[in-house]
Image (cartoon, rainbow, N blue to C red):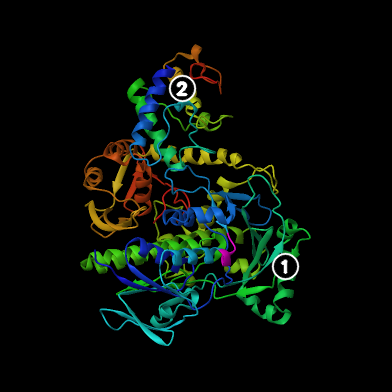
């Protein structure tokens, strides 16, 4: 699942990179900080990015995932602090939406496959 | 390539940046300065956009070598009993010329650095050379009286500051009835009190009779200024500037707490005639730039940015007209409109913050005069932003005078500190929670929109201009408009995007679907911004499943911060 999600997000980032002068590095995308200190997006860029990610998730999994839910916003560690965290959050949400509740990692868990 | 001969009046930041830009664009330029450098000026706190312009003009090494204080933010103790809030400049470096900080400078040093660069590039500069008259009567040239002689050129840029000879001659200056302040200031020997994320920040601190600026400069010096109502002039006369300054500053206890027992090391200075604009900023063969054109209250440190941005715009406009004589009227229309919109953005932004503070400070003369609470406020009747505010929109009750203070509240909430007092424990990271929540709320609001409505029947492309960030050439672009002349000038578009919006007039299109189409058309970096700006321009509105209007709150913004500089 995590590899699949990483591939989807890589696709979205590559689309954005087509128009950026300073490219978002994709060689270690999980470690990329999305927003805040050292983040690659401004507030409005993040809005665009989240809408685009929600769209590709719907296409891929046929489920509607909100990346701006209260659950996402109230996380102790923001899902937007890194791509790794975002993937962890999406994985939980996709599994919940698919009814695969037993496999949902705990809140704020770091996806093991993506490293540290 | 055709070259223009341009005379620049004034060697401050506007004059120097205009000269450097014209020189880069291949034109012949001469600068006349009435004074002799180095000379004293106030206006020491900058915005990141100014650094961006200087970077692109090739001055980065000199700026770095000068060791100016790095300014990461502006911090406000704004309103009695309010927690501090910080407007951080931090932003991703989406291009080499995007900056997440500004600088604080001693203007005599900074201005001399710019003028030195002008000279090094071979541009003639004459000091002690006041321009005493400008003759615009000949349609083919401009004639200036200077140094007891006459100078002719194709164009003149008046960057001569508030004493602009051209603004005076043209009688275009209009003083502002809302910001009738004056400032009294001096300098203190004072080490910066914070080492963390507040290091380098400008403090703006309200008190009963106005507000105080505190700007850290090189060499452990703080510039400390009081902005008070002009009616205090009588008291200044009675007490003398220094006693008035000391006694009034003592009332601003949150400022004096930062200063501690710091020693005042300079004389007390005063400036008034605080805010003005011009009926027009350019025409025929002249351009007004910087303080020659307009000046607004200094709360957001925008003065030098308005100066340098207008200087680049004037230079690129002259370049465009020289190469495309037939576009003269359109280029002037662009210069006037873009300058006025920038000026008005600051004006609106400032008014909202004054209004906010006026409800928290004691009801003194200063704060009562700076509150906007009536729709028939004659002081603001020529300002477009105020016209928009007082237009009745039954579907959008938040766009009203009564809710104007909430505009500032929203922005303040995003930057509010977690502690009530200033502290070295403050970290810009703590602001992320509120910012993410704001982003989330905005995204949710946008996602609610299942039907978009275009105002009018036609989606048109209208010619406009943009300054290319690296070449500084003014390029012809197209923006979206309708048949009634409403337009959105921030983001240029092409026929492909026009067709997308034309569909909105014929079919039911929701926000997500629109964004997908805009993304597919190559606008993935700015798709949401385009939609929001169209809503602000009144060209687009959104409705939810129940057909209720979805209101996207107008965001307070101004040029010179973020990643999308206007020049």
Give the vertical position of B83 relative to B119 (above or below).
Answer: above
Judged by its main secondary structure, the magenta piece is helix
Q: Which residue is mark 2?
A: A93
Q: Secondary structure at mark 2?
A: helix
Residue B107 on the magenta segment: yes
Where, quadrant-wise, is the C terminus of chain B in this rendering?
A: bottom left
| Residue B53 badge | none
Q: Which region shows up in magenta? A: B105-109
- Single out the residue that lies furthest toward the bottom: B148
Q: Is residue B448 above or below residue B288?
A: above
Vertical placement of residue A50 versus B256, above or below: above
Residue A45: percent from left, percent from top: 42, 40
Instruction: Locate residue B562 relative to residue B199 in the image: left or right.
Output: left
Q: Is residue B451 visible?
A: yes
Q: Position of residue B407 (x, y in %)?
A: 51, 53
Q: Residue at x 36, y 70 (%)?
A: B29
User: What is the total number of numbered labels drawn onto the structure image?
Assistant: 2
Query: Which residue has dot 1 on it?
Result: B265
In the rendered image, residue B394, in percent from the top left (x then y), is placed at 39, 54
Judged left or right of residue B180, residue A51 is left
Asked if the residue at tag 2 contacts the one at tag 1, i.e. Cβ–Cβ closer than 8 Å, the answer is no
Give the quarter of the image for residue B188.
bottom right
């Amino acid at each position: 699942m995590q590899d699949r999600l990483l591939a989807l997000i890589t696709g979205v980032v590559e689309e954005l990179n087509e128009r950026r002068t300073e490219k978002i590095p994709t060689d270690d995308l999980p470690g990329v900080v999305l927003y805040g200190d050292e983040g690659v997006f401004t507030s409005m860029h993040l809005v665009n990015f989240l809408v685009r990610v929600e769209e590709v998730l719907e296409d891929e999994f046929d489920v509607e995932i909100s990346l701006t839910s209260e659950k996402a916003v109230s996380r102790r560690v923001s899902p937007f602090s890194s791509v790794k965290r975002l993937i962890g959050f999406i994985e939980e949400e996709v599994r919940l939406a698919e009814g695969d509740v037993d496999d949902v990692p705990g809140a704020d868990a770091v996806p093991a496959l993506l490293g540290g | 390539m055709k070259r223009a001969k341009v005379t620049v009046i004034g060697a401050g930041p506007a004059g120097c940046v205009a000269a450097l830009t014209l020189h880069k664009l291949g034109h012949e330029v001469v600068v006349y300065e009435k004074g002799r450098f180095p000379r004293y000026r106030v206006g020491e706190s900058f915005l990141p956009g100014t650094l961006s312009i200087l970077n692109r003009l090739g001055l980065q090494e000199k700026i770095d070598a000068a060791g100016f204080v790095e300014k990461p933010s502006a911090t406000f103790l704004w309103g009695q009993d309010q927690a501090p809030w910080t407007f951080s400049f931090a932003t991703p470096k989406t291009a080499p010329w995007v900056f997440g900080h500004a600088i604080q400078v001693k203007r005599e040093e900074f201005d001399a650095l710019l003028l030195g660069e002008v000279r090094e590039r071979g541009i003639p500069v004459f000091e002690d050379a006041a321009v005493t008259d400008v003759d615009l009567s000949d349609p083919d040239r401009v004639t200036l009286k200077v140094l007891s002689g006459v100078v002719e050129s194709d164009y003149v840029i008046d960057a001569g500051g508030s004493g602009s000879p051209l603004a005076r001659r043209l009688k275009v200056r209009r003083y502002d009835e809302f910001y009738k302040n004056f400032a009294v200031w001096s300098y203190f020997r004072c080490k910066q009190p914070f080492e963390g994320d507040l290091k380098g920040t400008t403090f703006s601190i309200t008190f009963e009779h106005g507000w105080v600026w505190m700007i850290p400069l090189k060499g452990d010096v703080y510039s400390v200024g009081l902005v008070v109502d002009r009616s205090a002039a009588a008291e200044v006369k009675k007490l003398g500037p220094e006693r008035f300054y000391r006694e009034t500053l003592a009332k601003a206890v949150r400022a004096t707490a930062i200063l501690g027992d710091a020693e005042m090391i300079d004389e007390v200075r005063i400036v008034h005639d605080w805010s003005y604009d011009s009926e027009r900023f350019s025409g025929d063969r002249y351009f007004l730039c910087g303080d020659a054109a307009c000046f607004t209250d200094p709360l957001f440190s925008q003065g030098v940015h308005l100066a340098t941005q207008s200087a680049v715009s004037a230079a690129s406009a002259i370049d465009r007209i020289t190469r495309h004589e037939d576009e003269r009227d359109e280029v002037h229309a662009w210069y006037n409109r873009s300058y006025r919109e920038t000026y008005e953005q600051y004006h609106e932004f400032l008014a909202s913050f004054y209004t906010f503070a006026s409800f928290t400070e004691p009801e003194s003369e200063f704060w009562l005069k700076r509150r906007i609470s009536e729709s028939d406020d004659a002081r603001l009747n020529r300002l477009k932003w105020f016209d928009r505010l007082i237009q009745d929109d039954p579907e959008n009750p938040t766009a009203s005078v009564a809710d104007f203070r909430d505009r500032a509240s929203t922005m303040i909430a995003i930057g509010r500190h977690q502690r009530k007092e200033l502290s070295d424990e403050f970290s810009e990271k703590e602001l992320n929670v509120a910012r993410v929540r704001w982003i989330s709320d905005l995204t949710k609001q946008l996602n609610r929109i299942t039907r978009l409505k275009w105002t009018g029947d036609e989606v048109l492309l209208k010619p406009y201009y943009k300054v290319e960030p690296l070449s500084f050439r003014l390029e012809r672009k197209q923006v979206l408009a309708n048949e009634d002349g409403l337009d959105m000038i921030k983001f240029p578009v092409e026929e492909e995007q026009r067709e997308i919006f034309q569909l909105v007039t014929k079919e039911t299109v929701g926000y997500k679907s629109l964004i997908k189409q805009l993304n597919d058309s190559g606008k993935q970096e700015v798709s949401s911004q385009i939609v929001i700006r169209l809503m602000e321009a009144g060209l687009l509105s959104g409705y939810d499943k129940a057909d209720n209007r979805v209101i996207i709150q107008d965001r307070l913004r101004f040029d010179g911060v973020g990643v999308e500089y206007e020049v």
